[in-house]
Image (cartoon, rainbow, N blue to C red):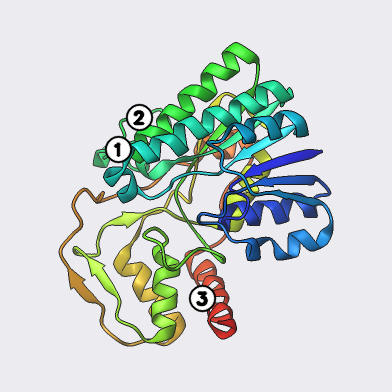
């Protein structure tokens, strides 16, 4: 089967590419390399089953390419994924996440693609859930509070419209806080990668607020397995992909500090404006629709991530 992965040079996308190739599929990747790295695809490119296209999904060339290549399934992961960037520049955020997504769907329509599996945001889609809505089910009202969350909600609305108008099946995976090897430790997202590099370098770590704020941290290999399953299962649904367990920033730091043998105390800073106090996803629908659940504990995933960052630092 020919699959196309947008954002396929990113840390989630490239891990998905590796999985698809290992399962015997041919893979096209579209990535403009604004945040993704060709080095993430080094092993994949050596297999001979990968074709890489350096394109921006906002361009008409992306539509033309998809129409010409005629992938059976598109995994749409390319995005502007920084909430603070979306607040500072909502027009740019919408151009990538809304216009770019429409281009992908237009390409899919012209290609006769049967299914699009898209990355949505479980952390922003539901806004600020009340305590009795945590873990948060997909039935909770979508009430995003950032331009990024709004653009991802709009993407889902377009997926629904293209399903009704053109018969393109979709699954939108509302992801928790994904972490793992290849995540950029220099971005604003990706606290696990950021902490890993700073702990290994012996640099100061800052925890904003009390550190009691929680997130649903889910390991990248588990997430990729959900994408793979969604290529052939279910349809027309938003499906949460997380662990169903809350982990505070303080607990995250303690676990990673223990793994690295660090005894330093983190610096405390005022809470960031607009940061959610709690975020955790109910994953019952994923179990029922995809026969999926996460299996990697945070300690296991953090240890693997730290080893990956250590190897990267050794190569630099």
Q: Position of residue 23 (x, y in %)?
A: 80, 50
Up the image or down, 254 lies above or below 262; here it is above
Up the image or down, 48 lies above or below 141; here it is below
Relative horizontal placement of residue 111, taking residue 185 as reference (left or right): right
Report which quarter residue 48 is drawn in. Answer: bottom right
Question: Residue at left 57%, top 40%?
Answer: 287
Q: Position of residue 173 (x, y in %)?
A: 53, 38
Classify mark 1: helix, strand or loop.
loop
Q: Position of residue 187 (x, y in %)?
A: 41, 62
Mark 3 → mark 1, Cα distance in angstroms = 31 Å
Along the viewing direction, whichever of 223 and 190 lies nearer the viewer: 190
Residue 297 appears in the picture as rendered: yes
Contact flag, marks 2 and 1 (Cβ < 8 Å)? yes
Q: Which of marks 2 and 1 is nearer the N terminus?
A: 1
Question: Residue at left 31%, top 35%?
Answer: 144
Along the viewing direction, whichever of 165 and 62 lies nearer the viewer: 62
Question: Residue at left 30%, top 38%?
Answer: 127
Along the viewing direction, whichever of 304 and 28 lies nearer the viewer: 28
Residue 232 appears in the picture as rendered: no
Which of the image's four quarters has the C terminus? Answer: bottom right
Residue with the mark numbered 1: 127
Give the residue at the far top of this rendering: 165
Q: Report the disc number at residue 306.
A: 3
Q: Report the disc number at residue 142.
A: 2
């Amino acid at each position: 089967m020919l699959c196309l992965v947008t954002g396929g040079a990113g840390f989630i996308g490239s891990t998905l590419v590796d999985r698809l190739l290992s399962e015997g599929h041919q893979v096209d990747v579209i990535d403009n390399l604004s945040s993704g790295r060709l080095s993430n695809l080094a092993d994949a490119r050596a297999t001979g089953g990968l074709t890489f296209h350096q394109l921006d999904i906002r361009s008409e060339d992306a539509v033309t390419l998809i129409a010409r290549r005629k992938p059976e399934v598109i995994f749409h992961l390319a995005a502007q994924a920084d909430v603070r960037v979306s607040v500072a520049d909502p027009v740019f955020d919408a151009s990538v996440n809304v216009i770019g997504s429409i281009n992908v769907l237009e390409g899919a329509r012209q290609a006769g693609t049967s299914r699009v599996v898209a990355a949505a945001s479980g952390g922003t889609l539901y806004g600020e859930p009340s305590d009795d809505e945590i873990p948060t089910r997909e039935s909770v009202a979508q009430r995003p509070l950032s331009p990024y969350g709004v653009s991802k909600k709009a993407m889902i609305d377009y997926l629904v419209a293209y399903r009704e108008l053109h018969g393109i099946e979709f699954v939108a995976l509302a992801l928790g806080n994904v972490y793992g090897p290849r995540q950029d430790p220099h971005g604003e997202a990706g606290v696990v990668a950021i902490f890993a590099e700073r702990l290994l370098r012996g640099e100061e770590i800052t925890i904003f607020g009390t550190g009691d704020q929680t997130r649903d941290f889910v390991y990248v290999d588990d997430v990729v397995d959900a994408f793979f399953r969604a290529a052939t299962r279910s349809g027309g649904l938003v499906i949460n992909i997380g662990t169903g367990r809350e982990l505070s920033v303080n607990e995250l730091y303690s676990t990673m500090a223990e793994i690295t043998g660090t005894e330093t105390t983190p610096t405390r800073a005022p809470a960031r404006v607009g940061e959610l106090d709690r975020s955790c996803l109910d994953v019952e629908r994923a179990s029922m629709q995809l026969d999926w659940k996460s299996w990697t504990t945070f300690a296991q995933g953090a240890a693997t991530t730290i080893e990956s960052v250590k190897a990267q630092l050794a190569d630099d």
